[in-house]
Image (spheres, coloured by chain):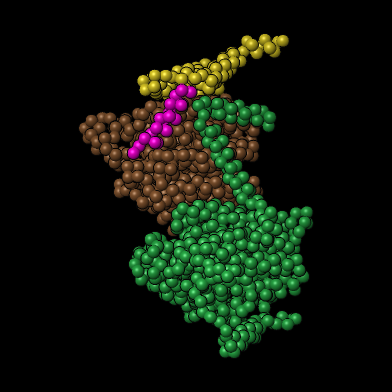
Chain colours: A yellow, B green, C brown
């Protein structure tokens, strides 16, 4: 019982749970919803989950922010000593980039959703799939 | 003669292709092309003595890839086949060079494709290693596809089925080559032969079977025989003659080289099929025998003269294979000789049949008859041809078939001998049907004004007919190069002379046989014409039955449903098994194609990705 | 000298952001600047080719040494793909079409910057970033025709691609949390031995599937048919020819350097062969030319993946040969096909109205089929040899049988082209002149390459040797640590 208590109190554990839950919900939203907007939202959740996992990769318990406070002291040994207690800064940099990319992709997806809605007046992915196939068929047989 | 003679031939072939492509439509170009083919044949013939002595004609053309040097050298076997090729192509072009060309619109295509075919075949014949062989093989398949598809419609369909079979064969060959390469690290014949035994017995078996399949498809050996007849029948006359004469013999040539030179017949004799059911050689011999019998009897059922001949072409291919695989000096000689013989009479027969259909507009045996007085030259040519095809003296077909029979008996294979005889029986029956329904019997009313074909068409026919006769009279002409071939391949050599062969138990001398026959016929004719000849010349319409005059529109000759009694007995044996098999494969492919396509056309396509990820992660857990 | 190769990525990015401004002053001429840039890139690469020579080089970005700093890794394989990408991009550059929107140029430049970045990057996260850049640009390009269908196709493509990228990122996160590094050379020292357990496998699969989306790996390639048939022809050509091969290149690097485990190879072999079979069969069924080519390119990608998954030197050589062949050939075929974008049966008698186009199509398709002596045959021969060397007999047979199916639908197409009966006048298609130039150039490169076949084979073998040399990769990237590290810090 003691072990379980430890685990439940562990921040790590809850971060994992939350991020995996986000990923699962996101995947569920993308794959099983027929509504395009829900798919985009699912994508947002999924990417948030992945980002949390990524930033967690550099997490260290009771460490300090990765800032070298004594800027004047550039001795190699000091920096190394400081990094031992720091949170790993690299995942944070990566997550920042990933968030920006994800935001861009989602914005693009939303703009496509708007265009699609203007053309077809529906956001049901099955209906739209059929519409796409029909358009293809028409364009193949119409040209002359 | 320089050793690089092959370069001259290649150069001439390029000129040939160029002329055909650029000026194929001009009226005299057919004659020029004929001359060029003859020139090419002559340039090989002039250095033929070099080949006979065991040397090779090589070409300066060469390239190196994957540490393999690919070069082209024409040995005596290649030279022999090349001569047949040039003969067939030259005479076919001659046939098409005159009046015939005017009635055929895509004549330029025909000339070009023919030249391409000859060039590709020469590349094949001169190839000196597996890589060169395979390249040339694919080229031959492609240009054959072109020339088969030339008429569109039915012939295009046949060409399509041909190219699929050809690709099946090519892939089989490629697989065999890859297995060989894996074991021997080489493509050259000599190296492969040297390292052959490094392969496990199973591998050897697979390779031999794959090679037989691959090359056999070109000559339509048994389970793959369905493509050939329609492909060779529905093409224009010169093409049919050319294809029927030599095209499918490329498969035989490759098999001959691969089985006898590279693998060696002794290796094949030691190979057994799984569970030691049957020896490889016996298996192949029976395959050849079935290839002889079944297509021959399918030919018997045909009512289209062209299809009949084309089916016979397949059957005679089985005959050649039977001879070559018998591992006997006489048999090999007979098999190779039959290639030449078959080329000569098959081309002659196709010319005759197409001459008839040129004049009458049909090759349907139910709609012809009595043309002997209208087209005497074609009749004579066909007579000579069918005697050759049936393998009766005095024509050349007799010699090769006799050699093969003799070899089968000598090797102690009486059942195979019986099979060969049954095949020949089918041949005799169907060629009789051919000549009877075309030239003999009652002349049809609509054919009253039919004339003999023009000289440009009849001269090539007559040349072929005389070749059929002369090589039957003096088989030693051919046996000389066959003996040289056998000695270069290192197999037992036939003991020949100008008139035939010597065997331990007696010999065949065609000069004696034919001279005797001619004398007998001459004496008979003398008796018939000089010593009293109570006959009266009547026209073909002057017919009576039971004392009643028969008007010319009344049909009293039966040509439909020939051999009804025989057919009643054997017709349950025609099962169309391969046809069913073929359609089963086609529908399976279509079914698979439909499923695959439907797989891709999914509204919820993301599911696949997730499924893949989940499954692969589960797999990781399992591993 | 080789440091100037950084310009490959920098210049397109720079120009992409400047172009809207330039366009304001130069108008339609602004397209030319892109062509000039690509020409400059070719010169740059040609110049660097010799200096790279036999040993790979590393560019340190920002002066930090690996594994901490970001590196560009330059060897012959990367250079080769960069050169081919540039050539194809130059041929497909949309400046000939009138009234091209400046946004199209921008997207093209971004796509190219992404391509170069992916090819040259030496660490996982940078590959991810450039891959996303490339992906975002391609979403934009796919939807350029502004038809409803292209929007839908683009959206579906975006979704599956983004999902794949998210998985790849998850894989990177996994790897980082176990190793604390994203530098490939550094990881190549750690992963093969120390991560040979469940998490390593999971990361490998996530990465492969994630990048497999663009590599047309089997079950995640369902966007291919719809995107290729709805997008602009040049974009299709670029996606099918270049982008998919670059994604395969990433997978190659992964399985050689990071995950050299037999189970992963088997996984890829399985997916590859299913891709080949399903692709060929679907192409057999397809009723329009663009879809047919899309499915056939799925099958070809499957072949490349099989070759790479042999993971031997011969396999890599075969894979590179197949990839290069397909990279040059598919764009040409797609360009030809885009002019006859209609149901196959309407193409009867095409050879009459556009003889050159159909002749080129036939030659290229024969090469695709692997008919000797065309270049495709040699690539396929290499593949078969490498499969045989690993004793994958079943795979060998399946590949050969798939080739027969391929022959079936291609020859059906040829026969339609050369059919005597023509389509009625208003349905006839004429392709000639300018439209053929890129196709002729590409086929010219392919056929001329045939004359230098032995030379080409030798250099391919060299490249494959270099690629499969893991030690050299690690030493090149990490060997510099001491050298520069001492001076800088």
Answer above or below: position of C209 versus B577: above
Give left or right: position of B156 versus C113.
right
Q: Quadrant of the N terminus of chain C?
A: top left
On the question of residue C296 being in view, the answer is yes
Answer above or below: position of C304 versus A46: below
Question: Where is residue C305 drawn, in percent x and y?
Answer: 55, 41
Give left or right: position of B151 versus C311.
left
Q: Residue at x 22, y 35 (%)?
A: C26
Q: Is residue A135 magenta?
A: yes
Question: Residue at the bottom extreme?
Answer: B531
Q: Residue at x 65, y 73 (%)?
A: B401
Q: Which residues are magenta?
A: A126-144
Q: Residue at x 67, y 10 (%)?
A: A5
Answer above or below: position of B525 versus C446: below
Answer above or below: position of C452 versus C80: below
User: Which quadrant of the view contains residue A21?
Assistant: top right
Q: Residue at x 45, y 54 (%)?
A: B152
On the question of residue B321 being in view, the answer is no
Question: Where is residue B77 drawn, in percent x and y?
Answer: 58, 72
Question: Where is residue C231 drawn, in percent x and y?
Answer: 39, 34
């Amino acid at each position: 019982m003691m072990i379980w208590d430890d685990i439940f109190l562990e921040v790590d554990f809850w971060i994992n749970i939350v991020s995996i839950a986000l990923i699962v919900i996101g995947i569920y939203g993308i794959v099983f919803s027929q509504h395009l907007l829900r798919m985009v939202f699912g994508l947002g959740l999924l990417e948030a989950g992945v980002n949390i996992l990524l930033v967690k990769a550099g997490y260290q318990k009771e460490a300090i922010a990765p800032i070298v406070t004594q800027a004047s002291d550039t001795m190699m040994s000091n920096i190394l000593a400081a990094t031992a207690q720091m949170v790993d800064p690299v995942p944070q940099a990566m997550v920042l980039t990933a968030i920006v990319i994800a935001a861009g992709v989602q914005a693009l997806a939303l703009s496509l959703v708007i265009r699609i809605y203007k053309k077809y007046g529906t956001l049901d992915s099955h209906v739209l799939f059929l519409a796409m196939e029909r358009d293809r068929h028409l364009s193949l047989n119409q040209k002359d | 003669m320089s050793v690089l003679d092959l370069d001259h031939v290649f150069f001439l072939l390029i000129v040939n292709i160029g002329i055909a492509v650029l000026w194929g439509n001009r009226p005299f170009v057919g004659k020029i092309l004929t001359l060029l083919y003859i020139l090419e044949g002559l340039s090989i013939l002039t250095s033929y003595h070099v080949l006979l002595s065991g040397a090779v004609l090589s070409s300066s053309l060469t390239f190196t890839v994957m540490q393999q040097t690919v070069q082209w050298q024409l040995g005596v076997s290649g030279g022999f086949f090349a001569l047949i090729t040039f003969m067939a192509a030259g005479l076919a072009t001659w046939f098409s060079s005159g009046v015939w060309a005017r009635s055929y619109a895509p004549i330029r295509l025909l000339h070009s494709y023919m030249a391409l075919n000859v060039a590709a075949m020469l590349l094949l014949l001169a190839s000196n290693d597996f890589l060169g062989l395979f390249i040339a093989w694919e080229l031959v398949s492609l240009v054959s596809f072109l020339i088969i598809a030339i008429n569109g419609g039915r012939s295009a369909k046949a060409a399509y089925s041909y190219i699929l079979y050809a690709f099946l064969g090519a892939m089989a060959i490629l697989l065999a080559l890859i297995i060989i390469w894996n074991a021997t690290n080489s493509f050259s014949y000599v190296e492969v032969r040297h390292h052959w035994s490094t392969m496990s017995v199973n591998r050897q078996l697979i390779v031999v079977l794959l090679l037989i399949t691959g090359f056999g498809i070109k000559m339509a050996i048994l389970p793959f025989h369905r493509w050939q007849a329609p492909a060779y029948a529905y093409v224009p006359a010169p093409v049919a003659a050319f294809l029927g004469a030599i095209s499918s013999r490329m498969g035989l040539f490759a098999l001959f080289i691969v089985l006898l030179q590279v693998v060696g017949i002794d290796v094949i004799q030691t190979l057994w099929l799984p569970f030691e059911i049957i020896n490889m050689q016996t298996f192949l011999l029976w395959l050849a025998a079935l290839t002889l019998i079944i297509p021959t009897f399918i030919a018997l059922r045909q009512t289209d003269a062209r299809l009949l001949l084309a089916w016979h072409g397949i059957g005679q291919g089985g005959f050649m294979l039977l001879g070559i695989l018998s591992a006997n000096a006489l048999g090999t000689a007979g098999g190779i000789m039959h290639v030449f013989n078959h080329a000569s009479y098959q081309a002659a027969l196709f010319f005759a049949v197409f001459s008839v259909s040129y004049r009458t507009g049909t090759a349907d045996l139910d709609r012809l008859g009595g043309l002997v007085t209208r087209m005497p030259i074609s009749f004579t040519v066909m007579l000579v041809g069918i005697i050759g095809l049936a393998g009766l003296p005095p024509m050349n077909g007799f010699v090769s078939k006799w050699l093969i029979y003799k070899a089968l008996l000598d090797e102690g294979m009486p059942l195979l001998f019986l099979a060969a005889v049954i095949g020949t029986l089918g041949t005799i029956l169907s060629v009789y049907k051919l000549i009877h329904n075309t030239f003999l019997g009652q002349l049809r009313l609509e054919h009253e004004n039919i004339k003999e074909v023009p000289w440009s068409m009849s001269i090539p026919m007559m040349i072929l007919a005389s070749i059929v006769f002369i090589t039957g009279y003096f088989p030693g002409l051919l046996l000389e190069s066959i003996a040289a071939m056998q000695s270069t391949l290192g197999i037992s050599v036939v003991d020949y002379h100008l008139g035939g062969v010597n065997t331990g138990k007696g010999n065949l001398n065609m000069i004696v046989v034919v001279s005797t026959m001619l004398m007998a016929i001459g004496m008979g004719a003398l008796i018939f014409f000089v010593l009293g000849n109570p006959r009266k010349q009547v026209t073909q319409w002057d017919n009576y039955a039971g004392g009643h005059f028969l008007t010319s529109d009344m049909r009293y000759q039966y040509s439909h449903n020939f051999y009804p009694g025989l057919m009643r007995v054997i017709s349950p044996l025609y099962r169309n098994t391969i046809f069913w098999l073929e359609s089963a494969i086609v529908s399976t492919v279509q079914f698979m194609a439909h499923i695959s396509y439907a797989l891709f056309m999914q509204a919820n396509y993301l599911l696949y990705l997730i499924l893949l990820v989940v499954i692969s992660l589960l797999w990781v857990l399992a591993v | 000298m080789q440091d100037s190769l950084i310009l490959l990525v920098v210049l397109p990015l720079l120009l992409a952001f400047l172009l809207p401004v330039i366009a304001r002053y130069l108008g339609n001429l602004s397209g030319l600047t892109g062509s000039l840039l690509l020409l400059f890139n070719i010169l740059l690469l040609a110049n660097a080719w010799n200096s790279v020579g036999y040993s790979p080089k590393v560019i340190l970005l920002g002066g930090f040494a690996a594994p901490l700093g970001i590196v560009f890794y330059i060897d012959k394989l990367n250079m080769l793909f960069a050169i081919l990408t540039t050539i194809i991009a130059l041929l497909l550059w949309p400046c000939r079409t009138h009234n091209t929107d400046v946004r199209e140029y921008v997207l093209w430049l971004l796509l190219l910057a992404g391509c170069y970045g992916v090819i040259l990057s030496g660490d996982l996260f940078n590959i991810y970033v450039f891959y996303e850049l490339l992906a975002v640009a391609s979403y934009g390009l796919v939807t350029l025709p502004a038809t409803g269908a292209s929007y839908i196709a683009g959206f579906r493509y975006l979704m599956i691609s983004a999902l794949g990228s998210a998985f790849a990122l998850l894989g990177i996160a996994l790897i980082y949390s176990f190793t604390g590094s994203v530098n490939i050379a550094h990881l190549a020292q750690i992963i093969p031995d120390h991560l040979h357990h469940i998490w390593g496998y999971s990361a490998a699969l996530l990465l492969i599937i994630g990048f497999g989306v663009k590599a047309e790996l089997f079950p995640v390639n369902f966007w291919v048919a719809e995107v290729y048939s709805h997008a602009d022809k040049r974009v299709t050509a670029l996606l099918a020819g270049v982008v998919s091969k670059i994604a395969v290149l990433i997978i190659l690097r992964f399985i050689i350097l990071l995950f050299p485990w037999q189970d992963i190879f088997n996984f890829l072999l399985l997916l590859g062969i299913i891709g080949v079979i399903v692709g060929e069969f679907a192409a057999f069924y397809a009723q329009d030319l663009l879809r047919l080519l899309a499915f056939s390119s799925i099958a070809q990608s499957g072949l490349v993946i099989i070759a790479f998954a042999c993971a031997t030197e011969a396999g890599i050589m075969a894979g590179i040969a197949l990839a290069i062949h397909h990279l040059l050939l598919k764009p040409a075929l797609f360009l030809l096909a885009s002019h006859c974008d209609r149901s196959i049966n309407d193409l009867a008698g095409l050879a009459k109205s556009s003889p050159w186009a159909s002749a080129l199509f036939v030659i290229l398709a024969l090469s695709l089929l692997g008919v000797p002596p065309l270049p495709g045959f040699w690539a396929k021969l290499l593949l078969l040899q490498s499969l045989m060397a690993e004793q994958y007999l079943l795979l060998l047979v399946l590949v050969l049988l798939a080739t027969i199916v391929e022959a079936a639908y291609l020859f059906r197409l040829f026969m339609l082209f050369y059919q005597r009966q023509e389509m009625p006048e208003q349905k006839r298609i004429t392709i000639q002149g300018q439209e053929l130039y890129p196709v002729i150039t590409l086929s010219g490169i392919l056929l001329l390459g045939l004359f230098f076949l032995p030379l080409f084979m030798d250099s391919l073998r060299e490249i494959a040797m270099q690629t499969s040399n893991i030690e050299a990769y690690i030493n090149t990237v990490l060997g510099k640590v001491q050298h520069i590290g001492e001076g800088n810090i």
